[in-house]
Image: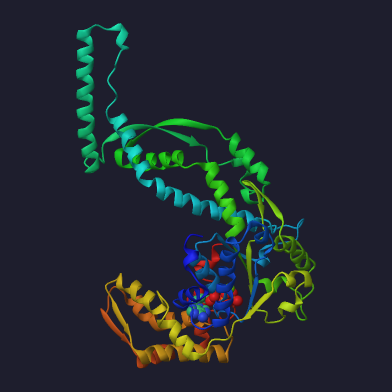
Amino acid sequence: MKQIEHLTPRQIVAELDKYIIGQDDAKRAVAIAIRNRWRRLNLDAEIAEEVAPKNIIMAGPTGVGKTEIARRLAALVGAPFVKVEATKFTEVGYVGRDVESMIRDLVERAIQMVHSEQAQVFEEQAAQAAIERILDSLLPKPFSPPSSTIDTQQAESVQQAQERYERTRSKLREQLAAEGLEDRQIEITVEEKSASIPIFSNVGMDQMEPEMQNFLEKMMPSKSARRKVTVAQARQTLHHHELEKLIDREKMIETAIERTEQAGIVFLDEIDKVCGGESVGPDVSREGVQRDLLPMVEGSAINTRHGMVRTDHILFIAAGAFSRNKPADLMPELQGRFPIRVKLKDLDQEQFRRILTEPKNSLTCQQQALLATEGIKIKFTDDGIVAMAKKAFEINDAQQNIGARRLYAVMEKVLEQISFDAPDGEKKYIINQEYVNEHLSRSTDDEDLNIFGFAAGVVRKDEQSDK
Ligand SMILES: Nc1ncnc2c1ncn2[C@@H]1O[C@H](COP(=O)(O)OP(=O)(O)OP(=O)(O)O)[C@@H](O)[C@H]1O
Ligand SMILES: [Mg+2]
């Protein structure tokens, strides 16, 4: 939450503008919701307790930026964030993930965040400690008998040995710093936990009771193992071990839970799919999922393996296409917890054109970078970009409207030949209107460009991660 105090709603929108074209209402709504949590944190505890988060429902057709907004937002505010599909959940008692698992995921995410912040703090210290341990193993300490048992002459030679030892050690330290000993073999001792629990391998930690998980982890024997490794490997391993020693785990978890409760954001995608409506067939578990979601959104305590987590102030952003139903078809109680509704609009051709070029790392930048790895330069002319936007728009219109995702299909088709010929073939291409039209018309009919057509649910790689 450190960055957020500098982010006013206006600035949040300005940041989102760098990636998302149009959809101003949605950007404003999320910006206000985010700022409100920061405002709440600056209130007296008594009143802060009372302020409920302004949960949001984003409704709008497929491929117009709902998920994209949430994803960028999370990165921007540095808050713990999870994206889950409501359709993944089933009513308690049915097979599938229970809704509480999203809060457990959120805590894990927060722990990762706090951990990597702590790792940064102790980075230098851990690196130093790792070096000392490597030195210990390169050069064992000289034997020094207790001073009461030796005479002055022996004491002197012990003293000399000690000094020699210190000199050699500091020489070695210099060599290590210059990475002169990286391939040298040494022996190090590390604590290891056996990683897997074979008997439970088909259950998955996720579905296990939190207490059970903790219990199993404690049960797993941790043994110290001596291993022969190169200095380079030792550096990595020991750095990691020293870091874990320096980080106060209990404190870290405490901070992470606090951050989850105060700043966590859950993005509930596909909410329309667990909501009734006319042409959506009856499904017992749909209502059930909504009923399970309710306490979570209303505020309750969820049992996680790291302790109880209260959900009262977690921000929920729900999204759905609502093509066959509307937010009003959700359970009334649930609707009440999502006071902010924003509609995302269909994108027009001009917006398609901007999506191709304007966002940071836009589709055109990505393609240029990819082909540059093959030593191939491509340049898109303005009329080339317009031609792609136009084509994408027309196909959406004529066939199924899959929003900006159509641009991906069009782009692939336009660059297919270049992509196939690389790294042989030409080294430079100009993608202008003529080029675009020629390569798009080569495909026998538009069905070729409809690779996404039969599945509006086609997702990008990063979205698949939690599928
Ligand atoms: N307004 C936009 N500005 C920039 N890029 C966009 C915009 N809308 C969509 N895109 C691009 O299209 C892709 C798909 O959009 P997104 O995942 O946000 O769709 P969605 O609205 O969540 O649709 P669905 O309802 O199918 O989940 C994004 O990854 C992004 O690259
Ligand atoms: Mg989406």
Tell me which corner region of the image, top left, top right, bottom left or bottom right, holds residue 372. Answer: bottom left
Q: Which sits in the foreground, 228 or 336?
A: 336
Q: Is residue 282 visible?
A: yes
Q: Please give the count of numbered marks on the rendered protein.
A: 0
Q: Which sits in the foreground, 428 or 226?
A: 226
**Residue for point 46% across, 91% down:** 390
144 relative to 5 in the view: left or right: left
Q: Position of residue 257 (x, y in %)?
A: 59, 51
**Residue for point 55% across, 88% down:** 396
39 relative to 167 in the view: left or right: right
Up-down relation of residue 100 to residue 320 (above or below): above
Which residue extends farthest front? Answer: 44
Coloring basis for residues = rainbow
**Residue for point 63% across, 53% down:** 104
328 relative to 466 in the view: left or right: right
Tell me which corner region of the image, top left, top right, bottom left or bottom right, holds residue 423. Answer: bottom left
Up-down relation of residue 324 to residue 123 (above or below): below
Tell me which corner region of the image, top left, top right, bottom left or bottom right, holds residue 310. Answer: bottom right
Quarter of the picture containing the C terminus is: bottom right
Up-down relation of residue 440 to residue 234 (above or below): below
Q: Position of residue 415 (x, y in %)?
A: 38, 81
Q: Position of residue 414 (x, y in %)?
A: 40, 84
111 relative to 296 in the view: left or right: left
**Residue for point 51% across, 82% down:** 406
Q: Is residue 106 visible?
A: no
Q: Position of residue 391 (x, y in %)?
A: 47, 90
